[in-house]
Amino acid sequence: MSVQGEPAAPWGPPYLLYLGSATDDLAIKTARGLAYWRPQWCLGQHRRADCAVTLGLPDIELAQGRNEGAQTMVIGAANAGGVMGPEMVADAIAALEAGLHVVSGLHHKLRDHPDIVAAARVHGRTLFDARAAQPGTPVGTGKPRAGRRLLTVGTDCSVGKMYTALALERSLRQRGHRADFRATGQTGILIAGAGIPVDAVVADFISGAAEVISPARDDGGWDLIEGQGSLFHPSYAGVSLGLLHGSQPDALVLCHEPTRRHMRGLADYPIPDLMACMEANLTAARLTNPAVKPVGIALNTSNLPAHEAQAICERVGALFGLPCQDPVAMGVEAITDHLIASFEI
């Protein structure tokens, strides 16, 4: 057995994406992110009988998946608190018994469950906790560093910050520019193969973690840093602020879901005004980079008809005087154009 932090046996794709008993799409955002950005890695999905959602991938049993070439089961479902219930624990053990490595992005660590650790040891499989912070993260210094950085920020959680950063990386690379996605959450880490899960970092070290994942660079390229949470979310504003300070962003893209009426999980807190949200993020970012600029708005319009999505992007873009697009439905080329023009790259 190998556990993160020790010399690890190889684990990786092809993946079998575990959806468990998920009841809504937000609960499987890790699995959906992998299926969207790395479809070539994803062999199929494994669901319990009461699972209410699907990725549209083949439903595959654990032993079948191993026989068809799967190497790793990725726990792609999450719940409030990131807890592994008895059913999930049993399924993780069954995957190990079937010959699969197991990867998780939950707060409840695989390596902290003795039965899972024992099964991994018996069957010679690897466990990897993507949401485990590594030791040695320094305190942030705020010292200016070379390079260009863009941070995605949001009006709420789960509004498209990771998707936007990945789309901008792809767009810049397609145009011949150097660009690197910098992951700060469990899904992004599994997609990129590296990163720091900042919501698992002790508060004093969040800005330092952002400095570590986006170090100085002198090649003219961009770091596209995955934002987390929202300055307006009472539960997660701390991690958002730490990222703003540690990233020292030259550019911000504000992400928003226009059909959402209250902060995720907090019905008494309405979604903030877009203009106020942008200004609050710019004000916070100016502490470590006074020259920061807004370069675009990214809307998640997946719950809107196409004509309404286009209309709201046009209205919001006109309000800010910035390009506004849905990165999935429309791409980010207009935002990339504005980024290039703003920094003459």
Image: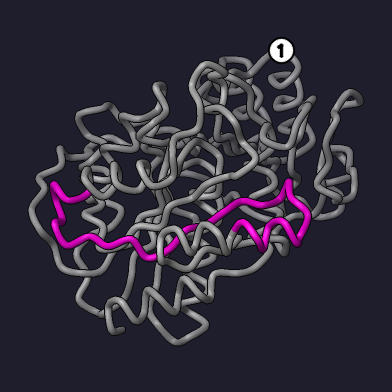
Please provide percent x and percent y for residue 215.
23, 60
| Above or below for 80 versus 166 | above
The quadrant of the rendering that contains the C terminus is: bottom left
Membership of 171 in magenta stretch = no
* Amino acid type shown at disc 1: Pro
> Left or right: where does residue 286 sit relative to residue 274?
left
Q: Is residue 301 left or right of residue 218?
A: right
Residue 133 sits in quarter: top left
Q: How many marks?
A: 1
Question: Left or right of 274: which side holds 329?
Answer: right
Label 1: few (<14), some (14–19) or many (≥20) C-alpha neighbours in 10 Å: few
Q: Which residue is mark 1?
A: 86
SS type, badge 1: helix
- Who is closer to the viewer here, 237 or 59? 237
Q: Position of residue 193 (x, y in %)?
A: 49, 55
- The part of the chain drawn in magenta is 285-312
Return the residue found at the far bottom: 176
Residue 3 versus residue 343 in the image, above or below: above
